[in-house]
Image: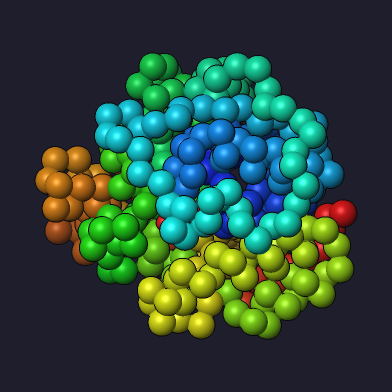
Amino acid sequence: MPRPILIDTDPGQDDAVALLLALASPAELQLLGITTVAGNVPLELTTRNALMMVELAGRPQVAVYAGCDRPMVRPLVTAEYVHGKTGIDGAGTPAPTTEAAAGHAVDFIVQTALATPGLTVCTLGPLTNLGTALERSPEIGDNIEQIVLMGGGFFEGGNTTPAAEFNIYVDPQAADIVFRAGIPLVMMPLDVTHQALTSDARVEAFKALGNAAGGATAGMLEFFERYDMERYGTRGAPLHDPTVIAYLLEPELFGGRQCWVEIETTSELTMGMTVVDWWGLTNHEPNCLVINQIDDERFFGLLIERLGRLP
Ligand code: RIB
Ligand code: CA
């Protein structure tokens, strides 16, 4: 039986590739819906981009619900400097012909969780929608089997401030609610995503698929990777968000450790830092599987094989 999942996202080129991976894997993943949040770009654009991806994947029936247009407490911070004005610069895909579903993403998350025991929630952006849903209806935690999230960093530090990764930095208060909710967490921090780097050969492999999804992915990655290559001097960019979906499809590609993780929500210096008790120095019970290992060759092999199944 396919695993019931919900994806919360702020497309973003890497989110877009994660969506395509999930949409290409219906035998393993029953995608109940997509919820969008303000993050990489404002909500109107993250919603538009999610609609474009479900159409590109040939699955326009997958509902997209627009969610929160700003963090729970702090002002919105966006990342056009990484993703471009549209959020998915380089995609070259046509404007969406479908609309977002009626209703708010937070309501959809609550209703879906209440109706779906064993639900897996995948978050690829700031945790505003999920944090709001948990604050309003904490009982949904009883039905959420696990939350797999891209966010945070520890030995790798941050990518938005020296201490904080973007998804957590944008809405630390929402992240704090999620990390305290008592729901099993799997965290894909920069420590693992910075090992999943694009390259010329990998971009060419998407292009060589010869389908619309492969061409759009190659175009997005060629745009997306320029920022990280300049910033980090690497040959390629970390493909952050697809690690969340790949973990559900092939968990054996990953390794990590159960740790206690808490979110900094007080100090401006370290606001949004994921404080990871990697060495068990506190008496806190672990609340999160922190992933720090990936077989990147097999990860990209999975991506290319699955996206090859799309139109
Ligand atoms: O820090 C990387 C994360 O922030 C990714 O999810 C990227 O899409 C942005 O949302
Ligand atoms: Ca994202």
The one nearer the camera, 232 or 264, is: 232
Q: Residue at 86% of width from left, 68% of height from top?
A: 210
Residue 76 percent location from the top left of the image: 35, 38
Farthest residue toward the front?
A: 85
The one nearer the camera, 254 or 238, is: 238
Q: Residue at 75% of width from left, 76% of height from top?
A: 205
Please identify the quarter of the rendering in which residue 135 is found. top left
Judged left or right of residue 133, residue 88 is right
Residue 48 percent location from the top left of the image: 64, 38
Q: Quadrant of the N terminus?
A: top right
Q: Is residue 276 visible?
A: no
Number of disc labels: 0
Residue 29 percent location from the top left of the image: 70, 44
Please identify the quarter of the rendering in which residue 179 is found. top left
Judged left or right of residue 166, residue 226 is right
Q: Is residue 234 visible?
A: yes
Q: Residue at 61% of width from left, 53% of height from top?
A: 88
Q: Is residue 294 above or below residue 168?
A: below
The one nearer the camera, 55 or 2, is: 55
